[in-house]
Amino acid sequence: MQKTKGFTLIEVLIVVVVIAVLAAIAFPAYQDSVRKSRRTEAQSVLLQAAQILERCFTEFNSYTNSSCELIDGSNAFIDSNSDDTPFDGEGYYAITDTVLTATTFTLQATARSEGGQDQDTQCASFELDQAGKKESNGAGDDTADCW
């Protein structure tokens, strides 16, 4: 009798099914890890914007002076979608001001759809004010989980 070598079709199909099941489990976990790692972009860009506004306040005694790097000619906060924005980062978060007066500010970073970051429901947005108070909004119960 001659002994055959190789795999049967059933064996190959079983291996393919096992790989598909493992991929179905691993890929969502990988995407979740990537979204969590991108949260640092929101944090760093908010802190960067706050530092720029604080330098502006130190120099002009106002957060809304048009000579500030983040303030346009109409004394409004520069949209993070603008080409003139001084922000670092990949653009996974939109940075806006929710409060901007001469003596106070609250900045918000909201997840964008680029790269699927808007699927991060745990920490959908981050906020930072002039006093350094940090907040986050999303399905998470604790701001510390996001910051």
Image (cartoon, grey):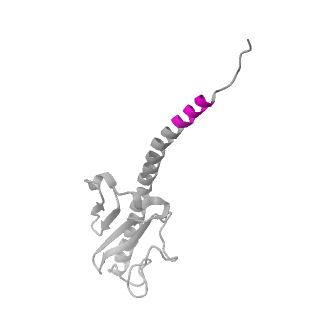
> Is 68 in front, or is 120?
120
Query: As drawn, which residue projects farthest toward the front?
Result: 1
In the image, residue 26 sits, relative to residue 66, either above or below, namely above
Residue 10 part of the magenta segment: yes
Location of residue 23 with respect to 129 vertically, above or below: above
- Residue located 45% across and 48% down the image: 28
Q: Residue at x 62, y 31 (%)?
A: 9
Look at the image and say whether residue 132 sits in the magenta stretch: no
Q: Which residues are magenta?
A: 9-18
Left/right of residue 96 with respect to residue 143 in the rendered view: right
Question: Which of 134/11 is in front?
Answer: 11
| Spot occupied by residue 139 in the image (x, y as percentages of width and height) | 29, 56
**Magenta: main secondary structure:** helix
Whether residue 128 can be seen here = yes
Count of labels shown? 0
Residue 95 location (% of width, % of height): 40, 70
**Quadrant of the rendering where the N terminus is positioned:** top right
Quadrant in the rendering for residue 102: bottom left
Q: Nearer the viewer, residue 118 or 51?
A: 118
Most distant residue in the bottom direction: 74
Tell me which residue sits at (50%, 63%) in the image.
Answer: 90
Q: Quadrant of the C terminus?
A: bottom left
View extreme (right): residue: 2
- Compared to residue 5, the image places residue 18 above or below, namely below
* Residue 125, quarter of picture: bottom left
**Residue 33 on image: x %, y %:** 44, 48
Name the quadrant containing residue 70. Answer: bottom left
Where does the image place residue 55, in percent across and percent down from the top left?
38, 73
Is residue 147 visible in the rendered image? The answer is no
Residue furthest out toward the left? 141
